[in-house]
Image (cartoon, rainbow, N blue to C red):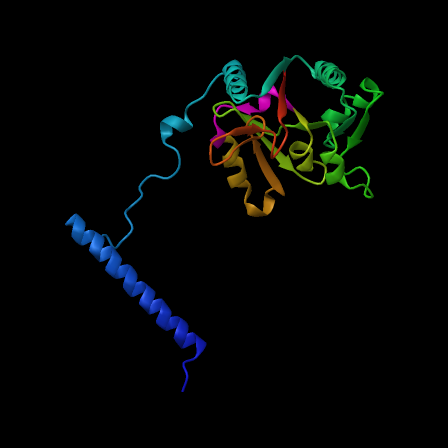
Amino acid sequence: MAETDREWLAKLEAQSRAKQEAFMNGIAQRLKRPRVTEAPAHPFRGAPDFWNAFEWTPEERIERFSDNWRSVGGHVARLTGYEDVRSFIAAKANEMGARYIIRQNERELADLKLEEALPDAVVSVWNSDPDTNWKARSAEADFGIVMADYAAAYTGTVAVLSSKDKGRSVSLLPTVLMIVIPAERIRTRLGEVLIGFDRAGRENLPAGIHFISGPSRSSDIENDLTIGVHGPGIVYALIVG
């Protein structure tokens, strides 16, 4: 009588485990020490206390974030208020000849009134029209404008969460990305950002959590660096306050 599929799979499993045992026993014999068959104890969990206590002042966070952001090819502008953000974006759009702009559907960005500041450009608001292909609209945009939910100074990283009003395409597809970062959202360590997601629990996580550390950078097998292949090649961090 032929073996059933279950018996055949069990036989393969047994053969595989026997080979693994022989392989590991051979390594232990060559090292001339007994095999470790139980997982070692891990008395420590997470970051050490000294790192959890590490903290920069608000001004140090801004300076360190800016230095790290620039070190990978990003641009930084330190701005006093949202009126300055509006003027900066409008000036850059005019300088670069941007005609198609898309932004997240957030109150702070709506208050910039970019439609008035850029009368010759088309300013679109993510997910404001159910009949629009918003991925395509993002791909054709010259500028994408988003709000940072968090930033980490030590790594020069911005975290942008996605939702129905905050499509990830706005930060991934346009040629130029403008990230508005309220200064109070800049933390010292990335762990300060991650712990909040852990405490929220899986059921309360957003649809996407995107970490951005400057412009898109890609290297092939010969280490030829290319900017802007998988995302915006020009990225501005606009620190407000």
- Residue positioned most to the front: 222
- List x then y, in percent, for residue 108: 72, 25
Q: Is residue 129 above or below residue 143?
A: below
Which one is nearer the viewer's eye here, 192 or 67? 67
- Residue positioned most to the bottom: 1
Tell me if residue 115 can be seen: yes
Instruction: Identify the residue at horizontal 49%, vertical 23% (top origin).
Output: 188
Instruction: Identify the residue at horizontal 74%, vertical 28% (top origin).
Output: 107
Tell me if residue 34 can be seen: no
- List x then y, in percent, for residue 69: 54, 21
Q: Which residues are magenta?
A: 179-191
- Residue positioned most to the left: 32
- List x then y, in percent, for residue 83: 73, 15
Quadrant position of residue 179? top right
- The N terminus - image quarter: bottom left
Q: Is residue 20 above or below residue 169?
A: below
